[in-house]
């Protein structure tokens, strides 16, 4: 589908139509500040693409061309601050990290490399200064990584080891507020999972068990505005 929908965090209720992306797309990754949201479309029209599009969050409407990523972006991880958005990895198990300046349209720029080449990371967790990319799939699809990497969003450079997730998984959904990152669901060699795990973004270390989802799931979307957090 090309449908964009929105809801208001403070009030429960059904989603409302926001507008459309330029093409029917899936495996899409997003990043935002409180003004602008940018989507890496992932796969559009049956082909993997490097297309970036943006919306102005306070006003509904269709997405507009932002620029291009340096490589195709299905199943990329994403983190960001109020000024910068960062994408990493993809369906081809890349180690590439690239960034955009949210306020200025244009093509993405090389940031550095992940510690391990992987994809299917489905988001990440970030504070205003640090971004953490979750576990993913690598080794041409044969290796389940439990690797957590972090970057300092304002300064380019290669990612650094943060710690380990509870298990090697892919398709794990990431979300965060300013202090804590949550990774949920995903899939390991035995199938889909309902595990929720958390990290404290400011201090490196392994993930800790948080609880369970209501059902097993993978390749989800999630969002967080402090409280509550939402996954679909």
Image: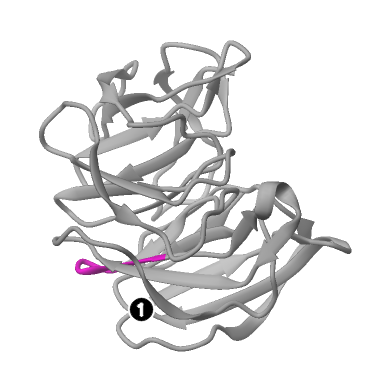
- Relative vertical location of residue 131 with respect to residue 61 in this rendering, above or below: below
Q: How is the image coloured?
A: one colour
Q: Relative to 24, is 176 on the left or the right?
A: left
- Find residue 204 and report its image quarter: bottom left
Quadrant where the N terminus sits is top right
**Residue 121 in the image: x percent, y percent?**
55, 53
Which of the pair 160/27 is nearer the observer? 160
Q: Position of residue 229 (x, y in %)?
A: 49, 62
Residue 105 drawn in magenta: no
Residue 68, position as x, y percentages in the image: 30, 24
Q: Is residue 69 left or right of residue 82?
A: right
Q: Nearer the viewer, residue 37 or 164?
A: 164
Q: Residue at x 42, y 70 (%)?
A: 149
Q: Which residue is mark 1?
A: 201
Q: Is residue 230 above or below residue 28?
A: below
The residue lying furthest to the front in this view is: 139
Q: Quick one: 38 or 8, which is closer to the camera?
A: 38
| Residue 103 drawn above or below residue 182 | above
Which is nearer the eye, 198 or 10? Answer: 198
Report the residue at 40% width, 52% height from top.
9
Looking at the rendering, the stretch of residues picked out in magenta corresponds to: 127-132
């Amino acid at each position: 589908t090309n449908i964009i929908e929105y809801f208001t965090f403070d009030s429960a209720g059904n989603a409302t139509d926001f507008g459309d992306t330029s093409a029917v797309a899936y495996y899409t990754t997003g990043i935002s500040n409180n003004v602008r949201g940018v989507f890496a479309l992932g796969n559009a029209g049956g082909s993997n693409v490097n297309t970036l599009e943006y919306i102005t969050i306070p006003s509904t409407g269709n997405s507009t061309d932002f620029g291009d990523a340096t490589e195709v972006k299905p199943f990329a991880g994403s983190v960001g601050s109020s000024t910068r958005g960062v994408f990493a990895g993809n369906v081809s198990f890349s180690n590439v990290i690239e960034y955009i300046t949210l306020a200025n349209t244009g093509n993405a720029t090389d940031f550095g490399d992940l510690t391990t080449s992987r994809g299917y990371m489905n988001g990440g967790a970030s504070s205003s200064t640090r971004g953490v990319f979750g576990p993913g799939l690598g080794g041409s699809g044969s290796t389940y990584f439990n690797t957590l990497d972090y970057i300092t969003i304002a300064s380019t450079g290669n990612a650094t080891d943060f710690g380990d997730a509870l298990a090697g998984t892919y398709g794990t959904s990431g979300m965060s507020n300013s202090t804590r990152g949550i990774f949920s669901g995903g899939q390991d060699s035995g199938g889909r999972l309902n595990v929720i795990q958390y990290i404290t973004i400011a201090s490196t270390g392994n993930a800790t068990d948080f609880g369970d989802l209501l059902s097993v799931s993978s390749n989800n979307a999630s969002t967080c505005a402090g409280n509550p957090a939402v996954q679909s």
